[in-house]
Image: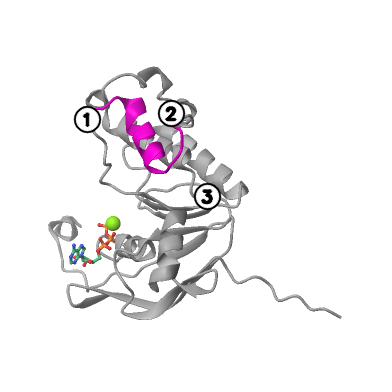
């Protein structure tokens, strides 16, 4: 009888630690991620959520342990070249060009991706920005800028989303849209990592709560009690 080996997880974070500024920020983290999964990272300011996402994106290397993609170490150059093409990064720095129109800001990313730009307008429409497509991006409010970033994610269409505080500045409808596109992406087999302080409804998500790094000093807030 032929016994098939189950496929390796898409991403395996194997006993990973990470240093920043000569200090250990993340210690012995283990996460197993299959297609369609979501991981929600929470924890106090400075606990290492962004560091974790940066490490997954390859901006920082683990100081111990390994991150495997399809069973291969992502830090080996041949693997990283392919792995990085799977990633879509949404951070607080929005890389929006104010002089371009809203539509051009999405199309520019699509063209860099080797695509023809035709996914940009439908993505903006889904995020509620269709009406503003031909306005200059400098006209956008904070929440509209975040919607534009999310439209880019949709237009570029890569499987692994790394999202740092994606709901910041979004209104209630914006958060619902965010939840909807995350659910849709996962149904199509995509993977989502989300660092957040605000509650975002993500069905069956794995939770990773990072601990406070230093004992907290008393602040003026404690004195109010
Ligand atoms: N550019 C940097 N160089 C060196 N150390 C940094 C840098 N950015 C952050 N750190 C340190 O790394 C630690 C983790 O920071 P990180 O930004 O990952 O936390 P976070 O959990 O994302 O916090 P927040 O909730 O404020 O976004 C902090 O102690 C911080 O001081
Ligand atoms: Mg952060």
Q: How is the image coloured?
A: one colour
Residue 29 at least partly seen: no
Where on the picture, by quarter, is residue 40? bottom left
Q: Quick one: SS at disc 3?
A: loop
Residue range (magenta) = 100-117
Dot 2 lies on which element?
Answer: helix
Of labels 2 and 3, earlier in sequence is: 2
Percent position of residue 135, x then y: 30, 19
x, y percent for residue 114: 43, 42
Q: Which residue is mark 2?
A: 124
Q: Quadrant of ligand 1?
A: bottom left
On residue 98, which mark appears?
A: 1
Q: Is residue 69 left or right of residue 169?
A: right
Quadrant for the C terminus, please. bottom left
Residue at point 17% right, 56% down?
Answer: 221
Q: Is residue 109 above or below residue 15?
A: above
- Which of pointers 3 and 1 lies earlier in the amino acid sequence? 1
Q: Is residue 37 above or below residue 110?
A: below
Sequence-earlier tag: 1 or 2: 1
Label 1–label 2 contact, CB within 8 A: no
Q: Position of residue 180 (x, y in %)?
A: 53, 39
Determine which of the numbered discs, if any, sits on residue 202 in the image: 3
Residue 222 as seen in the image, left or right of residue 6: left
Q: CA distance from mark 1 to mark 2?
A: 16 Å
Q: Residue at x 50, y 47 (%)?
A: 201
- Give the residue at x 30% y 65%: 48
Q: Nearer the viewer, residue 75 or 209?
A: 75
* 115 part of magenta stretch: yes
**Label drawn at residue 8:** none
């Amino acid at each position: 009888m032929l016994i098939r080996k189950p496929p390796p997880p898409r991403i395996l974070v194997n006993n990973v630690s990470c240093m920043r500024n000569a200090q250990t920020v993340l210690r012995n983290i283990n996460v197993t991620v299959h297609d369609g999964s979501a991981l929600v990272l929470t924890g106090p300011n400075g606990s290492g959520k962004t560091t974790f996402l940066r490490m997954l994106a390859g901006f920082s290397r683990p100081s111990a342990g390994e991150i495997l993609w399809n069973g291969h170490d992502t830090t080996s150059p041949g693997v990283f070249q392919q792995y990085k093409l799977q990633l879509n990064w949404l951070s607080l720095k929005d890389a929006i060009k104010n002089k371009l129109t809203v539509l051009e800001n999405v199309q520019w990313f699509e063209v860099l991706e080797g695509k023809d730009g035709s996914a940009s307008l439908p993505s903006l429409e889904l995020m509620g920005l269709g009406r503003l497509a031909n306005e200059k991006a400098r006209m956008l409010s904070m929440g509209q800028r975040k919607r534009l970033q999310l439209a880019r994610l949709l237009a570029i269409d890569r499987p692994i989303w790394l999202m740092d505080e994606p709901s910041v500045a979004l209104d209630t409808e914006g958060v619902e849209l965010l939840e909807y596109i995350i659910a849709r992406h996962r149904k199509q087999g995509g993977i989502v990592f989300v660092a957040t302080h605000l509650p975002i409804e993500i069905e069956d998500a794995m939770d990773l709560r990072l601990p406070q790094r230093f004992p907290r000093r008393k602040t003026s807030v404690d004195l109010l009690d």
